[in-house]
Each structure stands twice: as C-alpha cells, then as structure tokens.
Amino acid sequence: MKTNLCIVSLLTILALNLNAQLVVPTQDELQRFLKTKTIIFLEDNPLLNYNQKIQETAKKHWKITPYEFMTFNEKVFDSLRFDPNLSFLMLNNVYFKRDREIAEYVFLNVTLGGNYPTVKDMPTISGLPISYANVDESTYDYKLGLILRFIEQHVHNLMNNPKIKSSKRALKFYSENRKKIHNKTLYLRAEELTAEVNTVAKIKKYYPYKVKIATPEEIEAVVDKYDSEAVILHQVAPMKDHKKARCWNVILGADDAALYYFGWFHIKKGKQAQGMRAIDFKKLAK
C-alpha cells in the first residue's frame, strides 16, 4: 500500500474536502482529468485480495477515463506523476490530527498528474474512505463497484456544481437526496447494526420503510445490476475496541451512486458501540 499520512484537521463528507493540505481541483483540472488515462495502482503485496477485486470491479464500473493497471512502486510513481496526461487511483492512509485517539483510515483517492512540485501539491480529484487500516478487506471489497461509481459521480457533480467544493454547500447539495430514500430498499449487513436495531423488527420501530439485512454477495449483486430500487450502507468502523474512534455511515444509491445519507459519531468503549443506531434510523425516517 502506498502510505500517504495526511495531517488532517477536519473531515467533511468527501476526501477532497479533508484539509488544506489536500489540493482541491480547479474546473480546468477537472476537465483535464477527463482526458487522462488513469493508472489504477495495485498493492505490492500479491497476497491481498484487493488486487484481484479492483481489477474485476474496474472492468465493470470504471467508465470515466481509460485506465491501466500497475503494481505500485515509489520510483515508478515518482517518474509518472509529472505527466499531465495521467491520473492515479490508489489507496492512501489518512489520519486526523485533532482526534484524541489517532486512528488510521484507508481512502481510495484519484489524484491528477502534472507539473506539481510535490505529491502534496497534486490535486485530489475525488475519493472516499473505505475502511480503517488493518481491517480485513472483506468489510469493503464487495462494495468497490459502488465506491468507484461514487468517485466518478462526484467528479461530475463538481463540474456541474462548482460551489459544492465547500463542505457546507456539499452537505446541503447531497442532503436533497435523503427524502427519496423512503421509496427504496436499504441494504445493510448484520455486522453494521448496534444491538438496539439488529433485526428488521427492531429497525421498524424507528424506520418504517424497506430494509434488508443482506450478505456481501447479495449486496454486490444489487450493485452489479445497478438496481434503481436499492440503496446501500457503506460503513467505516474499526471492528475492534477503541476508546474514542469514529464510525462513519454513508448510504449510496445502487444505480446512480448518489449520496443519500452521511453521518458519523465517536465510538465510546462501554458506552457507544459502532454501527447504525436507532438515532440514525430516526434521521433517515424524517
């Protein structure tokens, strides 16, 4: 994995808004991105399932640019990153400086090549957190198609709505989708629910709309067929005890990868478990 530890002061809903050290692309750079070839970097550990999964998934879901797969190597990357005709899709490790407990997250980001002095100066075109570092790939690999499509969709949204580069306006822009969620089936896994809402019957007390507790295979099938009647929970959680870590809950449309819901909270050992909570379903029900 390419490790790029960003000193982050604030998390907004999208990777490109994470902090001042991540360069937000201009409209010209977004337009140039569409004309690039994207190098999709594989991890240099051949045992990782990610390498096979991202290749299978990109062939199904990456439509925005032509692409080529390449195993990550620092020297190779340094020789390619100055090429304005290239962009790079890769895993990056990120942590948040202001967190009381420093936790490391894995983001899937797209950056733009060109005559930028350092890697930190390269514009981050789009991205999304996919997991905590050192969490098993099985917590996210079945959703890679949806994540890739969201990354693409956000680029188009930035181009059509330049003002959403600010986190406040982005939240308002995407919050308009929430009212449409009641007409769709929400797919999520049992492991992504807290004890108070770990069955459909318990969920119905707070959220009276369609919910399916599904397997990874079922969710991947829904994503692959672009099901217009489905939305998918994408959760980023540590999967182990933390004194004070974050749990992210993001809901994306299975067909258009539109963002329907975004929320996060601090996990507190012995007080607040990770997972979707009753309060999250109450918000969704409004």
Image: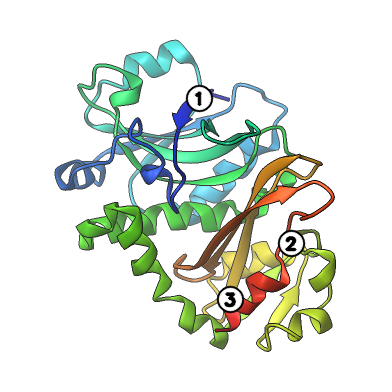
Q: Residue at x 51, y 30 (%)?
A: 97
Taking 43 as reference, is 277 above or below it? below
Q: Identify the image quadrant of the N terminus.
A: top right
The residue under label 2 is 217
For badge 3, the amino acid type reads Lys
Marks 3/1: CA–CA distance: 33 Å
The residue under label 3 is 283
Mark nearest the camera among 3 and 2 is: 3
Q: Nearer the viewer, residue 190 or 203?
A: 203
Colour logic = rainbow
For badge 2, the amino acid type reads Glu
Count the labels in the image: 3
Asked which secondary structure carries label 3, the reply is helix
Measured as percent of width and height from the top left, residue 79 is found at 33, 14
Q: Quadrant of residue 284?
A: bottom right
Mark nearest the camera among 3 and 1 is: 3
- Judge left or right: residue 8 versus residue 118: right
For badge 1, the amino acid type reads Leu
Asked which secondary structure carries label 2, the reply is helix
Mark nearest the camera among 1 and 2 is: 1
The residue under label 1 is 5
